[in-house]
Amino acid sequence: DIQMTQSPSTLSASIGDRVTITCRASQRVSQWLAWYQQKPGKAPKLLIYKASTLEDGVPSRFSGSGSGTEFTFTITSLQPDDVATYYCQQYNIFRTFGQGTKVEIK
Amino acid sequence: DVQLVESGGGLVQPGGSLRLSCAASGFTFRAYSMNWVRQAPGKAPEWVAYMSARLNTITYADSVRGRFTISRDNDRQSLFLQMTSLRVEDTAVYYCARGEGFPDSWGQGTQVTVSS
């Protein structure tokens, strides 16, 4: 199985800050990686797929990059509505999620 | 609008069975691969099962293979998950999700609790 490891597990930042989350795969997944946002009591929401492609309707302050085993998710200017847990997910071999990064406002 | 509505969850004893349903609307159901994904309290989501649009590919997570069965009825625009030999560790919210590798639409989830 491919293991996905996110860091950090929790992140506290101020409104307007640039926020970066890293996701590492235990083996190469090419560009087959997605990022989701999940708010309490809600289903995950797709933000990015194919490592860097923004889903329709998702604000441009969200972005993704990387390939192979190292990926980065960035929020260029943190907004109050961005408080959530973010998950990476590989879909190269079956599908596995990272353990999540909880983003809070400082 | 795309809608996925799960039902069938509940409280069941270890060793018991449940059948989850997902009613789809707002899109051509037969054209899409579908998935079941679960999430235990405070944990990351976990893929459970996948069925391709053409019904020729079905995949299960190791944790449920041999106990869970995914199926679909394209005429009724519905997805199902038959769960047998349920274990305490199967307790989770179960989501129906549309799409191939990265689901772009999810239902609201149905709670499955396995407890004596």
Image: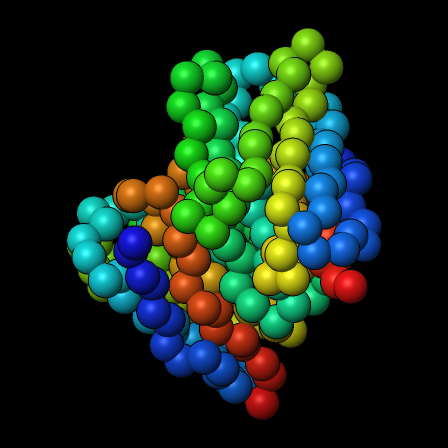
The image shows residue B34 at horizontal and vertical percentages of: 54, 30
Q: Quadrant of residue A23?
A: bottom left
List the single residue furthest toward the bottom.
A106
Q: Is residue B46 above or below residue B8?
A: below
Can residue A75 be seen? no
- The structure residue drawn at horizontal position 56% and vertical position 32%, both measured from the top left corner, is B69
List the single residue furthest toward the front.
B15
Q: How is the image coloured?
A: rainbow
Front residue of B63/A83: it is B63
Front residue of B88/A12: it is B88
Q: Is residue B11 above or below residue B60?
A: below
Which quarter of the rendered picture does the N terminus of chain A lie within? bottom left
- The structure residue drawn at horizontal position 59% and vertical position 52%, both measured from the top left corner, is B38
Q: Is residue A94 left or right of residue B83?
A: left
Which quarter of the rendered picture does the C terminus of chain A lie within? bottom right
The image shows residue A96 at horizontal and vertical percentages of: 40, 53
Q: Is residue A41 left or right of residue A56?
A: right
The image shows residue B56 at horizontal and vertical percentages of: 41, 17
Q: Is residue A33 left or right of residue B108?
A: left
The image shows residue A51 at horizontal and vertical percentages of: 32, 50
Front residue of A18/A25: it is A25
- The structure residue drawn at horizontal position 79% and vertical position 39%, both measured from the top left corner, is B8
Can residue B31 be seen? yes
Q: Is residue B45 above or below residue B23?
A: below
- The structure residue drawn at horizontal position 48% and vertical position 73%, both measured from the top left corner, is A101
Front residue of A9/B79: it is B79
List the single residue furthest toward the top.
B75
**Circle count:** 0
Q: Quadrant of residue B87?
A: bottom right
